[in-house]
């Protein structure tokens, strides 16, 4: 898995090494220059003769960039440093000038500096460091970046984090410089995985500086190799009841497909049994004869896909299921129409699966002043706030799926192709996640943070099944459900 660390955690890990005189900046600069040279070689087949512009701000990132520029200059690169602050890392600037690099201070007009950067083979962005809060670039730095963007953004290598983004949360509220490659040092930063910042980071490469990063990671991204440790694989003596039984309240005569897709995903994810409650049991059984229609003992629920809150019959069934969630500890996936019926408080064994607009409505019902745009601007913040207000684990759907749960657990998954933004995809995710919860509900009660890990696992598997359904091209929700068995088998190495 990929683990990220806040700026405070990184600084704390750097302090003992700096006290011992470990040359962290020199290590970072050397690695930065190596990766920059590799990009130049890829783009123009040679390092010598290239033109690189270093955008140097007042912090250590500016120093990293200047020292890297000095090393590039010694390899025959024409290096120009554009300095945007009165104070700059003097050692780095001196090293660059000694290597026959050039420096240009921005005191007034940014036109010359912007033209220089826009015409470069590559720009090293060292304007802001890991103290950036996402409020955007201001002053000379902001004017310079805006002028560069107006001329056409060159290839950008960001030093640690693209300037203008929130290092700890990915927030982007102002001028920022998108990167094609981000070279980050010591440990991954949350803003490199969280939206909207992750979309500005380009390819991310981590340089290990030997930091002893302690504490709980800020945000985690599961990788394919993590699935086997989380998936409920049946034992040799398993039977359908020990493998988990999932109750599904989904669909209506108006939205029959939601019931079919939800149950289909659960069946093909390997659940022991699916029980369906609703008005389209005949349609569900016609599609999947192994589904049982009617009440009975379950370990987990999925309710809400394809359900209107004013559907009296389905509303009664959802309220019945919520009673079981609260009183018997049965796990649940709360989706779509069921979100408006959410009780005041549930536990982390209930996983909400809204998109940004639905999450904004859940929050508004609980007194928060927030809209869809605000949720999209700070998804982790609002997912965590929803967890605080409801007690539920929250899986916020989007191009990057953000999960917030008990004990501070947070995940950011970016596994799906853009083609997955299609009708019914959420129903498939709900059924898949329901199968996971049913198979591991006892473990969730022992460790409530496990619900967030399982939600992230479902997002990963869902995304990879979408890739398998039709690599590189259009997909349907049904095709994603059909791709689940082979996808899961591959991830489990079986």
Image: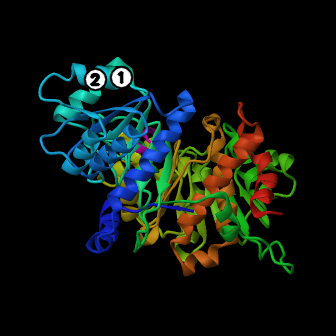
Element assignment for label 2:
helix
Q: Nearer the viewer, residue 472 or 232?
A: 472
In the shown orientation, is residue 25 left or right of residue 282? left
| Horizontal and vertical percent position of residue 85 | 16, 39
Asked whether 198 falls inside the magenta stretch, the response is yes
CB contact under 8 Å: marks 1 and 2 = yes
The image's colour scheme reads rainbow
Element assignment for label 1:
helix
Q: Is residue 267 visible?
A: no
Instruction: Name the residue carrying label 2.
Output: 114
Asked whether 100 falls inside the magenta stretch, the response is no
Instruction: Name the residue carrying label 1.
Output: 118
Q: Nearer the viewer, residue 250 or 414?
A: 414
| Horizontal and vertical percent position of residue 489 | 80, 59
The quadrant in which residue 198 appears is: top left
Determine crowd level at label 1: few under 14, some 14-19, many 20+ residues with C-alpha closer than 10 A.
Answer: many
Quadrant of the image containing the C terminus? bottom right
Q: Is residue 8 above or below residue 257?
A: below
In percent of the image, x 59 and y 68: which residue is there?
331
For the record, the magenta segment spans: 197-201
The quadrant in which residue 115 appears is: top left
Q: Is residue 355 above or below residue 343?
A: above
Q: Is residue 345 above or below residue 56?
A: below
Determine crowd level at label 2: few under 14, some 14-19, many 20+ residues with C-alpha closer than 10 A.
Answer: many
Q: Nearer the viewer, residue 315 or 431?
A: 431
| Horizontal and vertical percent position of residue 100 | 29, 35
Magenta: predominant secondary structure element?
A: helix
| Horizontal and vertical percent position of residue 15 | 28, 70
Q: Is residue 154 above or below residue 162?
A: above
Quadrant of the image containing the N terminus? bottom right
Q: Is residue 450 visible?
A: yes
**How far is mark 1 from mark 2, CA to CA?**
6 Å
């Amino acid at each position: 898995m990929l683990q990220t660390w806040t700026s405070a955690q990184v600084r704390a890990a750097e302090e003992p090494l700096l006290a011992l005189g470990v040359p962290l900046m020199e290590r970072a600069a050397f690695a930065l220059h190596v990766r920059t040279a590799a990009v130049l070689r890829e783009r123009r087949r040679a390092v010598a003769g290239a033109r690189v512009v270093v955008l140097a701000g007042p912090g250590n990132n500016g120093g990293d960039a200047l020292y890297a520029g000095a090393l590039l200059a010694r390899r025959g690169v024409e290096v120009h440093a554009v300095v945007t602050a009165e104070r700059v890392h003097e050692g780095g600037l001196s090293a660059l000038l000694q290597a026959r690099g050039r420096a240009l201070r921005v005191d007034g007009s940014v036109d010359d500096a912007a033209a220089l950067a826009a015409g470069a083979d590559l720009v090293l962005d060292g304007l802001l460091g890991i103290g950036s809060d996402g409020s955007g670039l201001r002053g000379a730095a902001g004017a310079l970046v805006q002028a560069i963007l107006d001329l056409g953004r060159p290839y950008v290598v960001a030093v640690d984090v693209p300037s203008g983004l929130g290092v700890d949360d990915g927030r982007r509220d102002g001028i920022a410089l998108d990167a094609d490659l981000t070279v980050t040092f010591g440990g991954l930063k949350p803003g490199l995985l969280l939206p909207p910042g992750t979309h500005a980071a380009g390819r991310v490469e981590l340089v290990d500086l030997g930091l002893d990063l302690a504490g709980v990671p800020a945000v985690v991204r599961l990788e394919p190799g993590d699935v086997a440790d989380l998936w409920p694989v049946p034992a040799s003596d398993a039977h359908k009841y020990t493998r988990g039984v999932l109750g599904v309240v989904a669909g209506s005569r108006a939205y029959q497909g939601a019931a079919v897709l939800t149950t289909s995903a659960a069946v093909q994810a390997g659940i022991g049994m699916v029980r369906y409650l609703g008005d389209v049991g005949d349609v569900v059984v016609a599609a999947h004869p192994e589904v049982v229609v009617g009440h009975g003992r379950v370990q987990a629920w999925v309710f809400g896909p394809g359900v209107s809150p004013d559907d009296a019959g389905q509303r009664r069934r959802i309220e019945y299921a919520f009673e079981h969630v609260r009183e018997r500890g049965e796990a649940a996936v709360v989706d779509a129409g069921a979100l408006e019926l959410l009780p005041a408080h549930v536990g982390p064994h209930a996983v909400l699966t809204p998109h940004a607009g639905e999450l904004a409505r859940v929050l508004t019902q609980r007194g928060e002043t927030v809209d869809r745009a605000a949720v999209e601007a700070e998804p982790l913040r609002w997912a965590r706030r929803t967890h605080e207000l409801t007690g539920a684990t929250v899986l916020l759907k989007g191009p990057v799926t953000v999960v917030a749960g008990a004990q501070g657990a947070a995940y950011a998954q970016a596994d799906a192709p853009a083609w997955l933004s299609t009708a019914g995809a959420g129903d498939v995710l709900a059924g898949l996640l329901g199968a996971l919860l049913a198979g591991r509900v006892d473990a969730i009660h022992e460790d409530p943070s496990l619900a967030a890990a399982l939600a992230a696992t479902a997002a990963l598997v869902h995304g990879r099944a979408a890739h398998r359904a039709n690599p590189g091209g259009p997909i349907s929700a049904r095709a994603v459900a059909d791709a689940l068995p082979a996808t899961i088998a591959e991830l489990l190495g079986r």
